[in-house]
Image (cartoon, rainbow, N blue to C red):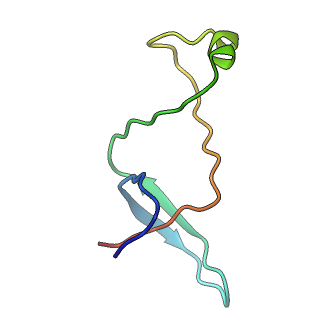
């Protein structure tokens, strides 16, 4: 199956609530993943980011596409 999304995170389904039109699903991430971000230098300096700093990553996305291969 071909799809446009390129970023993948392995997970397993933990719940599925089937509705008439929409079915909310929850997933548990099963693999350790590494993520990347591109931000302005001004933002990096404002956050005072340094290697080994602990931060929260907030994912801003329109869709999460479950794919079963």
Picture quadrant of residue 58: top right
Residue 64 appears left or right of 28: right
In this view, 43 is above or below 6: above
In this view, 5 is above or below 45: below
In this view, 67 is above or below 32: below
In front: 31, or 66? 66
Residue drawn at x 59%, y 29% as measured from the top left: 56
In this view, 10 is above or below 55: below
Residue drawn at x 64%, y 22% as measured from the top left: 40
Residue 38 appears left or right of 2: right
Residue drawn at x 62%, y 9% as measured from the top left: 48
Residue drawn at x 44%, y 55% as measured from the top left: 28
Residue 41 screen position, x and y as percent: 62, 16
* Quadrant housing the N terminus: bottom left
Residue 52 screen position, x and y as percent: 44, 13
Residue 57 screen position, x and y as percent: 57, 34
In front: 45, or 30? 45
Residue 22 screen position, x and y as percent: 65, 81
Task: Please state the total of marks drawn on the protein image.
Answer: 0
Q: Which residue is most to the left?
A: 69
* Quadrant housing the C terminus: bottom left
């Amino acid at each position: 199956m071909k799809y446009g999304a390129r970023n993948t995170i392995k997970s397993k389904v933990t719940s599925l609530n089937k509705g008439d039109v929409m079915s909310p699903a929850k997933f548990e991430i099963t693999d350790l993943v590494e993520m990347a971000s591109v931000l302005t230098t001004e933002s990096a300096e404002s956050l005072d980011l340094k290697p080994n700093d602990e931060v929260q990553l907030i994912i801003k996305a329109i869709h999460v596409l479950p794919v079963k291969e």
